[in-house]
């Protein structure tokens, strides 16, 4: 009987609703991808909705990591002696 007292029906119902909501979102996304693959118009709609992800900003830590990686690649190219401009070798 202690287990029944610990389980709150409101919390259980809330968890159930969250799980159902997530499943509907996943199902909807899957159906959207399948629909967009079948129809060219669907692909355009999918591509129109896709940029909404850009609403969420990229964290500054990730931007710093990318800048550091680019600098390391430039240093490696300089150390290896590879030319920066490959077109100048072809001329």
Image (cartoon, grey):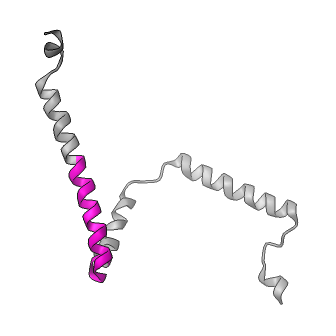
Magenta stretch, main secondary structure class = helix
Q: Position of residue 43 (x, y in %)?
A: 32, 77
Depth check, front residue: 48 or 2: 2
The residue drawn where x is 22% and y is 41% is 19
Above or below, comparing residue 68 to residue 77 in the picture: above
Total labels: the figure holds: 0
The residue drawn where x is 77% and y is 83% is 87
12 to the left or right of 68:
left
64 to the left or right of 79:
left
Indicate yes or no whether the magenta region holds residue 33. yes
Depth check, front residue: 66 or 80: 80
Q: Position of residue 20 (x, y in %)?
A: 19, 45
Above or below, comparing residue 25 to residue 51 in the picture: above
Indicate yes or no whether the magenta region holds residue 90. no
Dividing the image into 4 quarters, which one contains the C terminus? bottom right
The stretch in magenta equals: 22-43
The residue drawn where x is 80% and y is 59% is 76
The residue drawn where x is 11% and y is 25% is 9
Dividing the image into 4 quarters, which one contains the N terminus? top left
Q: Position of residue 71 (x, y in %)?
A: 72, 57
């Amino acid at each position: 009987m202690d287990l029944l007292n610990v389980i709150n029906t409101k919390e259980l119902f809330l968890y159930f609703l969250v799980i159902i909501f997530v499943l509907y979102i996943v199902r909807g996304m899957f159906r959207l991808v399948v629909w967009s693959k079948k129809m060219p118009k669907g692909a355009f709609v999918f591509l129109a909705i896709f940029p909404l992800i850009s609403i969420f900003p990229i964290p500054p830590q990730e931007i710093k990591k990318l800048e550091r990686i680019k600098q390391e690649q430039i240093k490696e190219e300089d150390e290896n002696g590879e030319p920066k401009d490959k077109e100048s070798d072809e001329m």
